Structures are given as structure tokens and as C-alpha cells.
Image: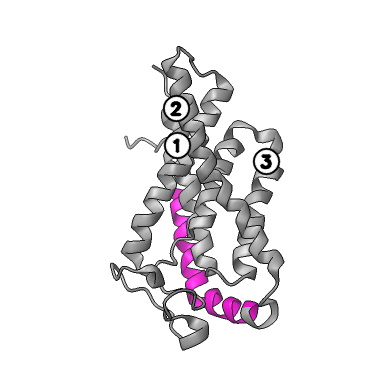
Amino acid sequence: MPTSLPLHTNRSLLAGLSCLILLGLSIAFLDRPLSSWSHQHLNGIDGFVWLTQIAEAPALLAVYALIAAGIAAACGWRPGRWGRILISCGVATLVALAIKEQLKFAFGRTWPETWVQNNPSWISNGVFSFEPFHGGQGWSSFPSGHTTAIAAPMAVVWQTLPRWRWLWASMVGLVAIGLLGADYHWLSDVIAGAYLGAAVAFGVLTLVNRPQ
């Protein structure tokens, strides 16, 4: 008789399917009108740019946290619950950011607006495309690095510190609002970054919490 898939496998499949559906809908129907609306109505509002800066701290903190954990471990420290959470946040953030860079190169997506070296964009040139393996900063919109950077550590604490889930979710939400309001990214970029960060975080937690 066929056996049913483990619960975590079912959840992973559902998460992957939901990601593909949301990305497809966003790319087909939402990315361009949202970018045009944001540029027309929200352009120049500094508050959205400030919100995106929330995502800049996790990567830097992750590096220092892992260095400190490594030194402490060399001195005989063995991480308890809080130590494992700290290490998981650091590892998840750095691994997610490394994967993000490879995905940006692989998908080669153009940006909503022109930011660097006269890159082609939707607002400036009506360009809306994926050019796989093109390379260059003008073709690296997908997935959102800022969303990835904040989603990875927030997904770790979402799982390990569920009492404060409203706070962890709000951090990701604020960064997403900033990115979309400033027209820095397409909606589908943000969706992909959130799923990538969460997927890496859950994978790291699975490894960290495995029995010896």
C-alpha cells in the first residue's frame, strides 16, 4: 500500500506551490501596474527609503554573531537554547544572502526604475524582462536581497520565539512596504525574497535541532 508523505514534506510542497502561484500572478498582473502607481504617487517620499534600511542590519550582525560564537566555542562554550537561536539567525542570513546572489545572476531580471549605469527599466524604457545569466547590476532585481536579509532571521525567531510573531512579521512587512513604496523592487521580487529567506531559515533550524 502507498504510504503518505511526512507532514513536513507536505508543508514544503505546499509552500513551494504557493510561491510559484503567487509569483506567477504577480509577474502577470501586479508588478507593472504597482510599479507605475508607486512611481506616480509615492516618488520622493523618504520614509519608504528609511523602511528599507531595517534590512541592512541583519547581515552585519550575523557576521559578528558568528565570529563571537566561534570564539566562545573555542573557549569551551556550548550553546544552549538562546545560543542556538543566535547561531541559526546568523547562519540562515548569510546562507540566504549567498544563494540570493546566485539567483540574481541566474534570472537576470531588470529593475522597476533606472538606478545604476543607465540600466534599462520599466519606468524609463518600458523594459520588463528576465534575461538569464546576463550579469551586471542592471539585471539583478530578482529576488529582493533586502527582503531575503530580513526574512531569514525573522523566520528563525518566528519558529523559535512564537510569542512575538506579530513583531517578526511586522519587520518583514515594513521592509516590503519600503521597497514597494520606493519602487526599488517588483512585488514578485519581494515575494521571492521572503520565501527564500524563510526556506533557508527552516532548513538551518532542521539541521541545528537534529539529534546527535
Describe the element under mark 2 as helix, strand or loop: helix
Kindly identify the residue that appears in the image at 43 percent across and 47 percent down: 96
Q: Could you tell me which quadrant the N terminus lies in?
A: top left
Describe the element under mark 1 as helix, strand or loop: helix
Residue extent of the magenta highlight: 13-38
Q: Amino acid at mark 2?
A: Val
The residue sitting at the bottom extreme is: 125
In contact (CB < 8 Å): disc 2 and disc 1: yes
* 63 w.r.t. 29: above or below: above
Q: Amino acid at mark 3?
A: Arg
Is 29 contained in the magenta span? Answer: yes
Q: Position of residue 211 (x, y in %)?
A: 42, 19
Mark 3 or 2, nearer chain start: 3
* Residue where numbered disc 2 is placed: 208
Prevailing SS of the magenta stretch:
helix
Q: Position of residue 74 (x, y in %)?
A: 41, 17
Mark 1 or 3, nearer chain start: 1
Number of other residues with Cα within 10 Å of mark 2, as a class: few under 14, some 14 to 19, many 20 or more: some
Q: How has the structure been colored for display?
A: one colour
Q: Could you tell me which quadrant the C terminus lies in?
A: top left
In contact (CB < 8 Å): disc 3 and disc 2: no
* Residue where numbered disc 3 is placed: 165
Kindly identify the residue that appears in the image at 53 percent across and 74 percent down: 31
- Residue 91's tag is 1
In contact (CB < 8 Å): disc 1 and disc 3: no
Q: Position of residue 87 (x, y in %)?
A: 49, 30
Residue 176 shows up from this direction: yes
Q: How far apart, in angstroms, are the residues tagged by discs 3 and 2?
A: 21 Å
Closer to the eye: label 2 or 1? 1
Q: How far apart, in angstroms, are the residues tagged by discs 2 and 1?
A: 10 Å
* 85 w.r.t. 36: above or below: above
The residue sitting at the top extreme is: 76
